[in-house]
């Protein structure tokens, strides 16, 4: 690399200011703060915000194939398994072979369903706090727009 190339490799203050408003960075920062709020609410139940969607989805859908659950939750199988392991250890979720197949599926146990019922008031309080902070924002519309934008085919 030439010295001239290195000198030009520096971003200008205007370019850095533009990059400071990065959608990805802003959403990740916001997500960390929101996750911490839900983690605090769920801590008395020994559950993390990253585990709650797995428990909810396996309760709603019944036995669900691992690959389908990963896709539904927007995560890769490795991340799903990492987040599901503590749920399996606590016997909140079971891992089993799908009937007549070698594919793996997850399902909530009775203990897991009971935990969801017990933590519902704590979850509702966290949800209400965030929705109050978002007063005036059409959250459902915003979520639908962002989800749609993330799924648009690349050209």
Image: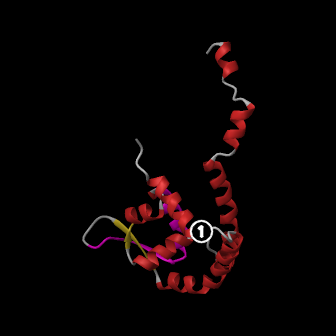
- If the image is split into quadrants, where does the N terminus sit? top right
Residue 117 to residue 80: above or below: below
Magenta residues span 78-99
Residue 72, quarter of the rendered image: bottom left
Q: Is disc 1 placed on a helix, strand or loop?
A: loop
Q: How many marks?
A: 1
In the rendered structure, the answer to whether residue 101 lies left or right of residue 79 reads: left
Q: Is 90 one of the magenta-colored residues? A: yes
In the rendered structure, the answer to whether residue 41 lies left or right of residue 69 reads: right
- Say how the picture is coloured: secondary structure
- In front: 134, or 42? 134
Q: What residue occupies the far right of the structure in this picture?
A: 13
Residue 7 to residue 84: above or below: above
Give the percent coordinates (x, y) of residue 22: 64, 45
Location of mark 1 (residue): 138
Residue 50, quarter of the rendered image: bottom right
- If the image is split into quadrants, where does the C terminus sit? top left
């Amino acid at each position: 690399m030439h010295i001239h190339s290195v000198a030009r490799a520096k971003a200008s203050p205007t370019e850095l200011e533009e990059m400071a408003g990065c959608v990805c960075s802003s959403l990740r920062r916001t997500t960390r703060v929101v996750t911490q709020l839900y983690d605090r609410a769920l801590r008395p139940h020994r559950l993390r915000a990253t585990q709650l969607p797995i428990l909810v989805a396996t309760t709603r859908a019944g036995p669900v194939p691992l690959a389908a659950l990963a896709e539904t939750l927007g995560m890769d199988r490795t991340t799903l398994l990492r987040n599901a392991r503590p749920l399996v250890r606590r016997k909140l979720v079971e891992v089993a072979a799908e009937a007549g197949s070698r594919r793996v599926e997850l399902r909530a146990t009775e203990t897991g369903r009971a935990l969801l019922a017990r933590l519902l008031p704590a979850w509702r309080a966290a949800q209400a706090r965030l929705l109050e902070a978002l007063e005036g924002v059409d959250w459902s519309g915003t979520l639908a727009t962002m989800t749609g934008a993330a799924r648009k085919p690349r050209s």
